[in-house]
């Protein structure tokens, strides 16, 4: 590692250069030509995704082992770029009608993307933390972008304070890990723990703080309080962003800290038990509380909490099989939830936010195609075949049962039954009820095409899930 | 025998593709087109099942028309199809019923026609998939996917309390099948990473594991059949569903449960099946007798037929767990016969409902005076439901009672009460609705069945009589399959 090899970080470097360029270019554009920065942003994401995908296979380190490009990072980066790009396309009209269609919006989104990419590629606790903060700070400000909205400001405040608290806990935990192992480099930490020379008590103590910090970032119960308020208060476009791509980055983050750095024999059992608790609580609280919601954004927030619980099932199984399952879960979840928020934005128009569940009444009569897309999304979230969400649940259940924890799978199954109820309610509103609102639904061709592609991807991946499953499994196998 | 064409794939996917095409016709402005396409799709879907029947070799052992393609390589899941005699009959029944449903909904459904027709076509293809799947995961995917169209059918075109009924139907059946999913994954791990049902048949399992797997399957299949005491969703679903929905529900969907016992529970957990057979038979007899009594006091025609369905399905579960050939075959024949008879009765109620918009027995009386042709059809189906010799209803019930007699006199005696109870509730309803003086002005203004209604009623009448008078072809198809299953179940896995 004595030579400076920048190639593994090419996507990040390109993205950074482009963000700076867009920042400058945008200064010289007036509002009527704002779409130039919009297009530049999309192109940046596209090229970044291509660069990430084109990177050489295998594991490559850079910056003295602080940064790693491995198959897991590569595929997650591609998914991150796609989902951020999709979010921008979905939210163009929405942002324009709410005065969010500004340079800051694009630049912050790109900075958040860059942060996420650094997170998934970090092989050092410092890089990990840098990525996390870059992402989080960008997202905090994006929530606050609509300055006149009290709800958004409150949400941003909550998000910031609790996020900072979580970061603090995480750093405190990591500092203890550093104290025990004398290193911040993930591979070295793992090696030190494996050699049994590290102080076990100190490590476990640090681990508790690390898991608490990660729990905050994931939104797992009991660290979930911020999530519904932020989802609710943020402009829907930003909610879409927060609810999609960062989950992918957080997944890699959790995996690198827990499975790779702290995955040694003695510690695995420790965090496994903590995660079991987090997972069961998340599935219980998330699913049960979601039933009581009348606001669809809050409902989806609680649904996110419960899905994080399901995803944790894969991670807590502590096997490569389970990590692959968790990755498949999170990728398909992001695909699904992006579609859900897109439909919400589609129903909104200038001066009207379609945030209430009742706004979905009779959607089948207003526009059968969008209703069908939302139907697929809801059945996917509920885990009913042939939507892809079923296979996501299947893979994590399989990982858990493989480890002999059948009881945990039974608990998960019962809570997914509870969850099915409120997803069904959305279908009921769309199909069984008469519409309250007869305003025509306007959308541009690109949004229509993308939303159709998104919905059909849920169905097609449900009919042929093999490829994506294999991809996730291979990526994990090659990277751990 | 191999004809080159992947017949089972066609049987599954032709209705589904037809459904998607019908769906694409869009709004009600093109309702005529949607109806015609749906009829075309269902008829073609039925026609492709005929070569199955013609080329099926009744003497051959094992699964026929097998197709095997890798599907999800990570879990070694295969797109594996194949049928034996039991599946063959159920596929034929399903495809036949779909044609009738399309005809029955022709002018009755005026709102969102394309979606209505598409839901039934897709449902039909998916259920064929359940009957043809030889891979555990494929089976489960098809089994679960039936919920979505049925949920929509009940909820969109159903009666006033449709939302409650649809959600209850969905959650009730989902609860059962989710535990089955756990059992499937358990079997996958136990079989060293195989989802093949035929591998599971050979898999050695300890008794406690077998009992757990059996109970997990029981949750799903008992809800679907439905067995007492998890039957309560069925009367609600039937009452609220549109006529076509009730027909599919009773004629085909309930059979998914019975079929699940045959394909999964019995061969995978034979020892558990033997040791729990007393329990299952007890539940079945409760269904036969108690639910028969419940049917007697119903005032709503659809509810009455729904309870009668539960009572008749009690024969199916009982026949399967007698472990003798005549009882088992009787159970399968009872499934087919019940498919015809319950479909016919629901269609008859539908005919009345379309005219008077009431399902209450009390609102009718003297229908025979205004609708003589209808009364004749209704009479035939009522007789078949009571198990009159010469109709299809007699064949299966009689065989199950014979099979029960071989095991225990009291089983047979209790089961035979259905011949009285069934006759009592069916014929009593028939008398109150059809005979007597004309009850009110509305009945006096009734018009007899039209040509379209005669088409589907006479198709079912022919089926009921043919099966009742000459059940031999069906029995012939079943003999080898049934004896294979029974000899497999007789071998202990311990």
Image (spheres, coloured by chain):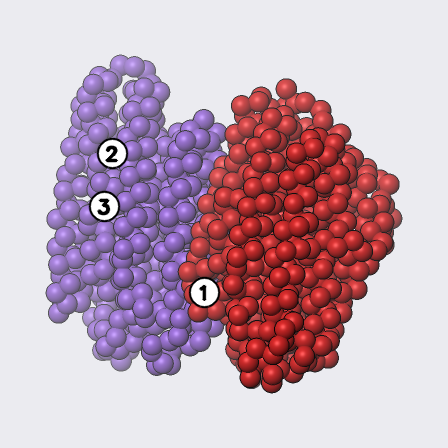
Chain colours: A purple, B red
Calculate the distance from the C-alpha at mark 1 to the C-alpha at mark 3. Answer: 36 Å
The answer to whether residue B1 is seen in the rendering is: yes
Tag 1 residue: B162
How dense is the environment of label 2, judged by Cα within 10 Å: few (below 14), some, or many (20 and up)?
many
In the rendered image, which quarter is residue A439 located in? bottom left
Give the CA distance from mark 3 to mark 2: 13 Å
The mark closer to the camera, 1 or 3, is 1
Q: Earlier in the sequence, mark 3 or mark 2?
A: 2
| Foreground: disc 3 or disc 2 | 3
In the picture of the structure, the residue carrying the numbered disc 2 is A211
Q: Residue at x 52, y 63 (%)?
A: B299
Residue A233: x and y, percent? 20, 61
Q: Are marks 2 and 1 on the same chain?
A: no
Query: Where does the image place residue B262, in percent across and percent down from the top left?
Result: 67, 40
State left or right for residue B223 relative to residue A284.
right
Labels 2 & 1 near each other (Cβ < 8 A): no
Cα gap from disc 2 to disc 1, whole angstroms: 46 Å
> Residue beneath label 3, please?
A224
Quick check: can you spot residue A328?
A: no
Question: Residue drawn 25% across and 75% down?
Answer: A352
């Amino acid at each position: 590692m004595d030579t400076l090899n920048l190639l593994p970080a090419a996507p990040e470097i390109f993205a950074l250069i482009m963000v700076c360029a867009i920042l400058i270019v945008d200064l010289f554009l007036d509002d009527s030509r704002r779409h130039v920065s919009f297009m530049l942003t999309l192109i940046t994401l596209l090229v970044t995704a291509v660069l990430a995908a084109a990177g050489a296979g295998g594991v490559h380190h850079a910056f003295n082992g602080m940064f790693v490009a491995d198959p897991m990072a590569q595929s997650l980066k591609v998914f991150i770029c796609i989902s951020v790009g999709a979010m921008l396309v979905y939210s163009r009209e929405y942002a324009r009608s709410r005065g969010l269609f500004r340079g800051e919006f694009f630049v912050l989104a790109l900075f958040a993307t860059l942060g996420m990419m650094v997170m998934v590629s970090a092989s050092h606790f410092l890089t990990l933390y840098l990525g996390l903060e870059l992402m989080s700070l960008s997202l905090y400000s994006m929530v606050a972008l609509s300055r006149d909205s009290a709800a958004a400001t409150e949400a941003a405040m909550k998000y910031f304070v609790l996020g900072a608290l979580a970061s603090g806990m995480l750093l405190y935990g990591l500092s203890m890990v550093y104290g025990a192992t004398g290193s911040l480099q993930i591979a070295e930490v793992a090696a030190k723990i494996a050699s049994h020379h590290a102080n076990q008590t100190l490590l476990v103590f640090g681990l508790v703080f690390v898991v608490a910090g990660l729990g905050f970032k994931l939104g797992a119960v009991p660290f979930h309080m911020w999530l519904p308020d932020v989802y609710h208060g943020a402009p829907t476009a930003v909610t879409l962003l927060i609810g999609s791509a960062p989950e992918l980055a957080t997944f890699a983050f959790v995996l690198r800290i827990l499975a790779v750095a702290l995955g040694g024999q003695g510690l695995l059992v420790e965090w496994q038990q903590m995660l079991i608790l987090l997972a069961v609580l998340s599935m219980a609280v998330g699913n049960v509380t979601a039933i009581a919601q009348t606001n669809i954004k809050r409902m989806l927030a609680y649904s996110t909490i419960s899905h994080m619980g399901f995803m944790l099932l894969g991670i807590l199984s502590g096997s490569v099989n389970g990590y692959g399952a968790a990755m498949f879960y999170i990728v398909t979840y992001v695909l699904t939830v992006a579609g859900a928020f897109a439909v919400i934005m589609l129903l909104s128009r200038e001066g009207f936010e379609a945030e209430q569940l009742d706004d979905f009444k009779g959607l089948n009569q207003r526009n059968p195609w969008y209703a069908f897309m939302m139907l697929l999304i809801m059945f996917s979230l509920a885990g009913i075949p042939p939507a892809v969400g079923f296979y996501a649940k299947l893979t994590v259940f399989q990982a858990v049962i493989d480890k002999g924890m059948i009881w945990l799978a039974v608990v998960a199954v019962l809570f997914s039954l509870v969850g099915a109820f409120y997803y069904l309610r959305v279908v009921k509103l769309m199909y069984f009820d008469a519409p309250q609102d007869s305003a025509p639904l306007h959308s541009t061709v690109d949004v229509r095409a993308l939303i159709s592609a998104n919905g059909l991807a849920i169905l097609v991946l449900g009919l042929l899930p093999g490829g994506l499953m294999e991809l996730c499994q291979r990526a994990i196998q090659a990277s751990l | 025998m191999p004809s080159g064409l992947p017949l089972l794939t066609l049987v599954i996917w032709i209705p589904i593709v037809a459904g998607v095409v019908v769906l694409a016709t869009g709004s009600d402005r093109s309702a005529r087109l949607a109806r015609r396409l749906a009829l075309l799709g269902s008829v073609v879907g039925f026609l492709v099942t005929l070569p199955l029947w013609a080329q099926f070799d009744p003497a051959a052992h094992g699964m026929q028309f097998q197709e095997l393609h890798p599907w999800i390589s990570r879990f070694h899941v295969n797109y594996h199809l194949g049928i034996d005699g039991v599946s063959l009959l159920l596929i034929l029944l399903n495809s036949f019923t779909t044609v009738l449903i399309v005809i029955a909904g022709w002018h009755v459904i005026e709102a969102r026609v394309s979606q209505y027709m598409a839901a039934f076509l897709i449902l039909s293809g998916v259920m064929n998939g359940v009957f043809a799947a030889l891979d555990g995961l494929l089976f489960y995917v098809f089994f679960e996917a039936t919920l979505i169209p049925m949920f929509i059918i009940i909820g969109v075109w159903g009666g006033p309390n449709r939302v409650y009924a649809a959600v209850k139907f969905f959650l009730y059946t989902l609860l059962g099948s989710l535990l089955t999913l756990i059992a499937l994954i358990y079997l996958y791990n136990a079989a060293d990473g195989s989802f093949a049902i035929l591998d599971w048949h050979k898999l050695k399992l300890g008794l406690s594991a077998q009992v757990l797997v059996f109970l997990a399957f029981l949750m799903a299949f008992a809800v679907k059949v439905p067995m007492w005491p998890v039957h309560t969703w069925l009367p609600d679903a039937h009452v609220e569903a549109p006529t076509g929905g009730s027909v599919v529900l009773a004629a085909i969907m309930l059979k998914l449960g019975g079929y699940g016992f045959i394909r999964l529970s019995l061969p995978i957990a034979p020892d558990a099946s033997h040791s729990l057979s007393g329990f299952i038979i007890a539940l079945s007899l409760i269904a036969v007798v108690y639910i028969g009594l419940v049917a007697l006091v119903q005032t709503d025609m659809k509810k009455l037929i729904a309870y009668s369905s539960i009572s008749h399905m009690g024969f199916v579960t009982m026949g399967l767990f007698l472990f003798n050939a005549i009882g088992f075959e009787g159970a399968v024949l009872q499934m087919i016969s019940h498919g015809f008879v319950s479909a016919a009765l629901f269609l008859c109620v539908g005919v009345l409902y379309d005219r008077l918009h009431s399902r209450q027995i009390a609102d009718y009386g003297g229908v025979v005076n205004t609708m003589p042709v209808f009364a004749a059809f209704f009479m035939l189906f009522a007789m078949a439901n009571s198990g009159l010799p010469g109709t299809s209803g007699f064949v299966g019930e009689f065989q199950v009672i014979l099979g029960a007699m071989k095991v225990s006199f009291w089983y047979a005696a209790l089961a035979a009460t259905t011949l009285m109870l069934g006759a009592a509730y069916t014929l009593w309803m028939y008398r109150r609705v059809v005979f007597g003086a004309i009850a009110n002005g509305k009945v006096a203004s009734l018009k007899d069945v039209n040509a379209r209604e005669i088409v589907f009623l006479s198709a079912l009448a022919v089926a009921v009589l043919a099966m009742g008078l000459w059940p031999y072809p069906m029995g012939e198809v079943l003999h080898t399959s049934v004896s294979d299953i029974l000899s497999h179940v007789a071998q202990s896995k311990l």
